[in-house]
Image (cartoon, helix red, strand yellow):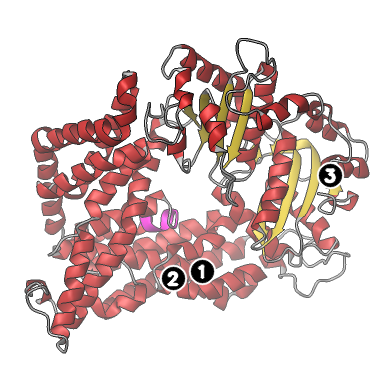
């Protein structure tokens, strides 16, 4: 970090009282040194990153960061706040604030800064020294590592043993009867940056304190270096501290394992180490398991017994979204192929014979039938994929077999989308129950490839065919009949509700629920008229936010900063293509104005689309599938109405905002910056 932070980038008396103000104060120092070229554009990128996940850490630390095209070189600024600034940490405001800026595309540089800093922040002596630093130069030198910290010196000898001890060696005492207990660990977090490396440092420090050898694989955003297979084979236990899926998890099969959230490794590493040692001592997997290669596919499955810190509702949402995320590509491919088949061959193309029996190269109808039938095959995977990957989200790879089997049965018994949801959840639960059962050592080798698939598929099949399949099929039929019976005011209200959901979180879970509800209705060979109306309303509403933001930046550009005006140009294309995420930069910078405005416009569009009776067979495509839409002119009117409503609301709300005086158009040296936005556009992160 020798060139990344200097005394000019340190503020030991940071007076900001909000995270936005803190980021601005530190970013202005970067601008003054020429390391950031556009203050407002950079702050918009910081705000967008902050909107994804709070950057506050326990212990009074905030680390706002981003990659940005407005950054010329990797830079770190530090501020110390006496009053504290809220960055969303569970234990309260942060008094040590680090603003990290990396050029766009500089993944390795960005990760290097963050990982190095995150590891240092786990050292109490380091943070204490920062809190007591008397001048900016001393603080900058400390962060650069020019002053050694006491906690990093003494344990180095033990740390070398971790890296160099060969499998089967006796460790510290070659004459003793036993070697130190060995643990391999994997840490990962959603962004793959700060928490990933803080958890690794915490586990390593706790291991040194307890005389345990801990080797950690950090699965960060720029990739990861795999643990040596020999180190895994020699390990006595495994800790998986993660908030996203662990890559290549099968390498650790056959080891007593604690599976938990990444914050647990930061906050209570000693307990996790104790849990692993207890499992090994109880003989859940004996020390002899290390004699064979860990990745050979055998042995005891991973137990998810660690405390993740998440409630059941959060876990359920993640499991369901796992299934939906894998299903959506099948929806898009199959739906568009079917829609193209209808566009070329007409709506009777679904009655065409199989192209295996009749295909004429020179006939358009044959090509239309081919597209329709390929799309139908893709659609047939929707429910099995949904169920399979819900189970995968719960139980990892062992959940795939019962999940796919259960999903296929749901199709067979006409349980549809609801049956797929139930099959996925049941499959994951069955696999987890099998994994927790005590397994004789002789069977461990065949558990993943024989026992778990056999037992779980049989149990799930029995439950779907005999116990819960018929009630779910009846519920699915009832819901279909209800949708088919919607008309008048009821249909309009449903369209408004779906429009609100599509615009609430712009590609997030609520948006995906509405989208999945719509696509499930058309994922059949002959969807009902009501189902196609719902699909049309959902796509129309999803196009509103980005198109409205594009229009707003065009007609009232002074209300937006330079970066937002550039994003507005791209939002035209994204909105027209039905990519709601095109409005995220605007929502992240000003959520209290943009999101409610988008929801109102989306509700208007959804309601009008249903009232006009517009229908859509394709699940995606935006304006590019307008020829496939029933009542296309009125459909476009519905979209235009919602866009105008959202645009007007955004302009009015932003126009009522009070600009902050004294800083709107000043460059780094205090003079007027001609590239700065006007006072009305000064607050991209204001609420």
Q: Which numbered mark, 3 or 2, is in the foreground of this view?
A: 3
Q: Is residue 661 above or below residue 223?
A: below
Q: Which numbered mark, 3 or 1, is in the foreground of this view?
A: 3
Q: Is residue 58 rendered to the left or right of residue 76?
A: left
Q: Which residues are magenta?
A: 500-506
Secondary structure state at the residue bearing disc 1: helix
Q: Which residue is mark 2?
A: 575
Q: Tell me the CA gap for discs 3 and 1.
A: 42 Å
* Residue 365 on image: x %, y %: 14, 83
* Residue 526 on image: x %, y %: 12, 65
Badge 1 density bin: few <14, some 14–19, many ≥20, Cα 10 Å = many
The label on residue 144 is 3
Q: Which residue is mark 1?
A: 549
Does the magenta-highlighted stretch encompass residue 504?
A: yes
The label on residue 37 is none
Does the magenta-highlighted stretch encompass residue 549?
A: no
* Residue 518 on image: x %, y %: 26, 58
Q: Tell me the CA gap for discs 2 and 1.
A: 9 Å
Secondary structure state at the residue bearing disc 2: helix
Badge 3 density bin: few <14, some 14–19, many ≥20, Cα 10 Å = some
Q: Is residue 589 rendered to the left or right of residue 466?
A: right
Residue under the image location 34 percent in, 44 percent down? 320
Nearer-N-terminus badge (3/1) = 3
Q: Is residue 46 above or below residue 276?
A: below
Tag 2 near tag 1, CB within 8 Å? yes
Query: Principal SS element in the magenta part?
Result: helix
């Amino acid at each position: 970090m020798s060139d990344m932070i200097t005394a000019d980038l340190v503020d030991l008396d940071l007076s900001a009282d909000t995270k936005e103000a803190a980021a601005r104060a530190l970013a202005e120092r970067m601008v003054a040194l020429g390391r950031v070229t556009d203050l407002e554009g950079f702050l918009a990128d910081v705000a967008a990153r902050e909107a994804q996940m709070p950057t506050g850490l326990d212990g009074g630390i905030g680390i706002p960061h981003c990659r940005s095209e407005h950054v010329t070189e990797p830079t770190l600024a530090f501020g110390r706040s006496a009053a504290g600034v809220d960055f969303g940490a569970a234990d309260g405001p942060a008094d040590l604030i680090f603003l990290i800026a990396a050029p766009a595309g500089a993944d390795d540089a960005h990760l290097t800064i963050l990982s190095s800093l995150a590891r240092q922040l786990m050292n109490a002596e380091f943070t204490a020294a920062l809190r007591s630093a008397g001048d900016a130069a001393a603080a900058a030198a400390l962060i650069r590592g020019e002053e050694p910290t006491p906690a990093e010196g003494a344990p180095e000898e033990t740390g070398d043993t971790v890296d160099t001890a060969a499998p089967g060696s006796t460790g510290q005492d070659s004459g003793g009867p036993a070697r130190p207990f060995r643990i391999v660990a994997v840490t990962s977090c959603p962004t793959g940056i700060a928490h990933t490396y803080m958890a690794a440092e915490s586990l390593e420090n706790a291991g040194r304190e307890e005389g345990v050898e801990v080797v950690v694989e950090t699965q960060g955003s720029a990739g990861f270096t795999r643990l040596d297979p020999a180190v895994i084979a020699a390990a006595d236990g495994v800790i998986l501290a993660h908030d996203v899926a662990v890559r290549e998890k099968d390498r650790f099969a056959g080891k007593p394992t604690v599976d938990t959230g990444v914050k647990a490794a930061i906050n209570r590493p000693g307990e996790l180490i104790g849990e692993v040692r207890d499992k090994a001592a109880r003989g859940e997997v004996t020390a002899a398991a290390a004699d064979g290669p860990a990745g050979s596919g055998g042995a005891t499955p991973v137990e998810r017994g660690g405390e993740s810190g998440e409630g059941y509702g959060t876990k359920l949402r993640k499991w369901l979204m796992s299934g939906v995320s894998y299903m959506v590509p099948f929806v898009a491919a199959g739906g568009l192929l079917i829609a193209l088949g209808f566009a070329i061959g007409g709506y009777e193309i679904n009655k065409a014979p199989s192209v295996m029996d009749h295909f004429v190269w020179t006939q358009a109808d044959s090509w239309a039938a081919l597209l329709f039938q390929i799309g139908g095959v893709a659609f047939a995977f929707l429910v099995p994929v949904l169920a399979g990957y819900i189970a995968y989200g719960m139980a990892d790879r062992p959940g795939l077999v019962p999940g796919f089997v259960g999903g296929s049965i749901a199709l067979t018994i006409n349980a549809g989308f609801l049956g797929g949801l139930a099959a996925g959840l049941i499959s994951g639960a069955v696999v987890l129950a099998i994994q927790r059962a005590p397994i004789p050592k002789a069977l461990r080798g065949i558990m993943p490839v024989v026992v778990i698939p056999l037992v779980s598929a049989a149990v799930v099949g029995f439950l779907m065919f005999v116990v819960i399949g018929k009630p779910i099929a009846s519920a699915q039929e009832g819901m279909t009949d209800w949708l088919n019976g919607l008309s008048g005011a009821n249909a309009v209200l449903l369209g408004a509700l779906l429009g609100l959901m599509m615009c609430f979180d712009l590609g997030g879970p609520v948006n995906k629920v509405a989208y999945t509800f719509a696509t499930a209705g058309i994922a059949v060979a002959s969807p009902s008229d009501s189902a196609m109306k719902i699909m049309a309303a959902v796509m129309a509403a999803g196009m509103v936010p980005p198109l409205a933001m594009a229009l707003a930046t065009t007609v009232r550009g002074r209300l937006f900063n330079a970066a937002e005006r550039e994003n507005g140009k791209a939002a035209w294309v994204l909105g027209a293509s039905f990519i709601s995420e095109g409005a995220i930069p605007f929502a992240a910078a000003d959520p209290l104005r943009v999101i409610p405005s988008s929801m109102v416009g989306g509700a208007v569009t959804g309601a009008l689309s249903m009232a006009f009776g517009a229908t859509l067979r394709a699940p995606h495509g935006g304006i590019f599938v307008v020829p496939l839409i029933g009542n296309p002119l009125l459909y476009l009117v519905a979209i235009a109405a919602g866009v105008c409503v959202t645009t007007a609301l955004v302009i009015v709300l932003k126009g009522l905002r009070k600009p902050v005086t004294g800083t709107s158009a000043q460059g780094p040296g205090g003079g007027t910056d001609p590239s700065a936005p006007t006072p009305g556009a000064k607050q991209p992160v204001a609420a």
